[in-house]
Image: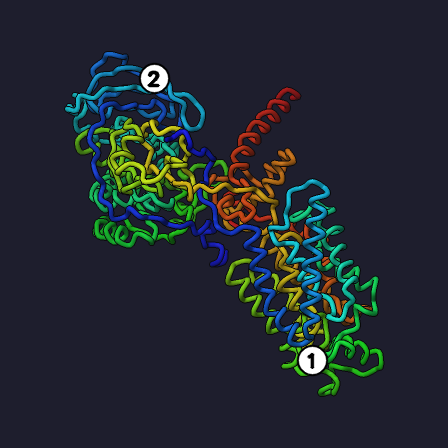
Amino acid sequence: MSIFDKRLKGVRAPHCKNTMDSATQKMPVPDKVYICMSQHMGPPCDVLVKPGDEVKVGQVIGDSGAFLSSPIHSSVSGKVTGIDQIIMPNGTRSKTVVIETDKEQTYHESVKKPEVTDRESFLKAVRGAGLVGLGGAGFPSHIKFNPKNLDEVDTLIINGAECEPYITSDYRTIMERGEDVMTGIQAVMKYLNIPTCIIGIEDNKPKGIARMQELAKGVPGVRVQSLVARYPQGAEKVLIFETTGRIVPEGKLPADVGCIVNNITTIAQLARFLKDGLPLIAKCVTVDGGAIAKPQNVQALIGTPIKEVVDFCGGYSKEPRKLLMGGPMMGTALYDETYPILKNNNAILAFDESQVEGYAETACIRCGRCVRSCPMNLMPLRIEDAFIKDDYQGLQDYKVNLCIECGCCAYSCPAKRHLVQTHRLAKARLRRWTQEQTAKEGGKG
Amino acid sequence: MTQNLVITSSPHFRAKDTTRTIMLDVLIALCPALIASVIWFGPRALLVSAVCVGASVLFEYTYRKLMHLDMTIGDLSAAVTGLLLAFNLPSSIPLWMAVIGCFVSIIIIKQLFGGIGKNFANPAIVGRIVLLISFATPMTNWPVPLGTDAVTGPTPLGMVSAMEAAGVDAASSATPPSLPTYVDMFLGKIGGSLGETCTLALLIGFVYLVIRKVITITEPVAFVGTVFVLSWLLGADPIFHVLAGGVMLGAIFMGTDYVTTPTTETGRLIFGIGAGILTVVIRLYGAYPEGVSFAILIMNIVTPHIDNLTRIKALGAEGGKKA
């Protein structure tokens, strides 16, 4: 492996980290919160309250028996006024608990320091905290911390890369809650018996790197690694490769190469829960974009409508044409500003007309920029070719299933082809095709 | 207020480059060579270039219009093809012949195969080859630099061919009196196609394209390097063979055409080496004194196979490491 191969491909997207020095402002309690029952990867939670119930801060109002799930807590104290249905940005429907707040924020009796003595009780506490991956994916943390082969895991990787443009909420975690991060790391290392921890931070945040280095001084096994500021440095598989040189094989999990990756804010939140038992009820989000009057970092209660968050930031300075939940590279476009803040939100971006370009697709000129930018070493132009021809074997050969949907290919394409979008469709169709093939073979046998 | 929100699938940012900006960069990179051609061959070089660009754009416009297809002249690729074809013609060529070359390039090679991105061979190369075979005499009547249009002479490669035919060994004689000096060849003060002679100007264009990240250095370096090494191994003058004829123009501007060359860096390396070998072999052993255009055409044809052989392995794909 030559030195050139080690360079992260990816793209040099503009950083736009305008809100780096904006300390997190705490938003007042809104009149009503809308707590969505689908805030993690996996099936939505069942509603455990009914209209008319009094709820308190930290009370579990949604839970599910499914393996891939995480409980949902009330972020306010008040009265449940209704159970609504909302359409999620991805088109699925989800129940939403509407709570009228009494603004007193009285804690539920379940909010107390959890007793953690061993691995079992630690995992229970993580689930009780309602923790999910706060970087955006929303993968339930207690499942991440509980791989089948835990004894093979030797490295905890803390993801502080924050490679998406605009977003600075993880950076604010480092600056404002650095101690929590260290406490959380030490707890995970202790209870899961992981000897080493690498904190990866992009080098466009020198103060953040210095701060974590300072905090990690004298803590055995913990080191901070500066990463080249290049998108998608914070993608799980990329981060594992950049920090440890290990490659997660196709169809395997990070734990299979001895790694557990966690977002830095998730870890800080974990420390908070271990201290006083307060589950995940508020989230720091970066509010930015050309249409926002006063871009800043805001701590909002989960379930606060986005409109109120925007109003807190001085409202819109221009007419918004695109509203994003998450960053511009992988975030989701919203159709409605009444949509509530979720656990895994880390940014609300409102773009004005000038930032929303209509891209006319032109013919592929085979320039190979998508190939040069793909962090997974895929060949997006070939995948698109195979997709257009309904060539499922080709899709399989070109490994579209390994696509992490980071969007580098579509970003770099001069012909403005919708490459990553095609990959998403191709992945779904290939999955279905593979199932059909297996069924057919099963029928023959 | 929010009724007007745009919903698209991520990414919501796109790089600023478009096909048009890339083609514009290529046109800019061709400008030094265009200026050099006017210096050495006079205003007629500019006239031939203008006619080729105009005719190419017009052919593309007419075809797209008649066939009710999207208009693509705005991406400037037809202009690039026209200018590259002009660079491959002697400045004395009758204009109607140049227009025929443009027809072959744009209509037959590019549009009939589906337009930009779909052509299997470099349109300008095929245009030149068709003209060379159809009109052998006007296509090999090379105006002398700084001379009047009426005065013509051979290219350096033509001289070597002629000497070989006459039994004089160009490589072994100390300084063949009639061959131009390296400095003259580097500056382009030699007979040849109007845009291919000035190595200096072409190199300026090369540096510009590399800085603008339009091309990578792999293919040009492989092409020129192979010509140098192979001609040296076969006993010919390596510096002469690199500076003479269309090696520089071909390596920098034709062998890096996205559509007709491989996508991966390994593929581009293979393409460059292959084109270099074919060029030297044709020059030293073939019937034609110059072999760059044939070499590139042949490599264009095998490009899909190179692409298939140089697929890169995905990160973490079964049984593999990062390629």
**Label 2 near label 1: C-beta < 8 Å?**
no
Picture quarter containing residue B12?
top left
Taking B1 as reference, is A205 above or below it? below
Amino acid type at image mark 1:
Leu
Element type at mark 2: strand
Which label belongs to residue B155?
A: none
- Position of A382 with respect to A297 (left or right) is right
Residue at the disc numbered 1: B146
Question: Where does the image place residue B22, in percent across and percent down from the top left?
Answer: 56, 55
Tag 1 and tag 2 share a subunit: no
Depth check, mark 1 against mark 2: the one in front is: 1
Amino acid type at image mark 2:
Asp
Q: Nearer the viewer, residue A9 or B131?
A: B131
- Position of B115 with respect to A141 (left or right) is right
Picture quarter containing residue A173?
top left
Residue at the disc numbered 2: A84
Q: Nearer the viewer, residue A195 or A74?
A: A74
Taking A115 as reference, is A379 above or below it? below
> Going 81% across and 83% down the picture, which residue do you hit?
B168
Give neighbour class at mark 1: few <14, some 14-19, many 20+ (Cα, 10 Å): some
